[in-house]
Image (cartoon, rainbow, N blue to C red):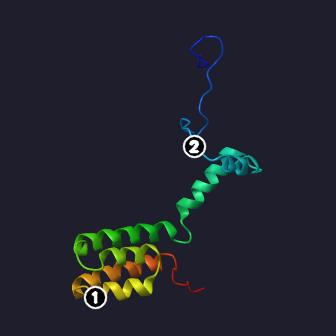
Amino acid sequence: MAAQSLSGTAPALQPQTGATLSRHVALLPRHWQWLSEQPCGVNAALRRLVQEARRDVQGRYRARQLKEDCYFLMRDMAGDGPLFEEASRALFADDMARFHALVRRWPAHVADAVLALAAQAASATNPPARGR
């Protein structure tokens, strides 16, 4: 038996296999323009973009998460200490030379923990080469 619409006149559309309820997306006009130009259509282009981002091939998402973890570790261990704000700015500006110079002036156990996490963040975007 076909599903009926609220008015009772025409059958309601059923979601396609794998489809979910629609949600609204707020984009700028230039984003809608780009999406409308995609040969596969707006929905397929959005699904493709989401899938590509989920793969995180270049490790950018993981690197950002690790960098934020590094910041929270810094805040918890040295947030009220000297050079915390400057080190935070250097971390998020990817000025790693300055970051290392500032953090090395903290107590050794704090500096070692922070620099180890920062190194993980840096290596997430530059994964080691795989052998063939």
Q: Nearer the viewer, mark 1 or mark 2?
A: 1
Name the residue tied to disc 2.
26
* Mark nearer the N terminus (1 vs 2): 2
Q: Residue at x 34, y 73 (%)?
A: 70
The CA distance from mark 1 to mark 2 is 45 Å
Name the residue tied to disc 1.
105
Rendering coords of residue 112 (x, y %): 28, 85
Query: Which quadrant holds the N terminus?
Result: top right
Nearer-the-camera pick, 41 or 88: 88
Answer with the quarter of the image where residue 80 lies: bottom left
Rendering coords of residue 49 (x, y %): 62, 56
Q: Is residue 75 left or right of residue 86?
A: left
Q: Is residue 12 left or right of residue 96?
A: right
- Label 1 SS: loop
Rendering coords of residue 25 (x, y %): 57, 42
Q: Is residue 41 left or right of residue 81?
A: right
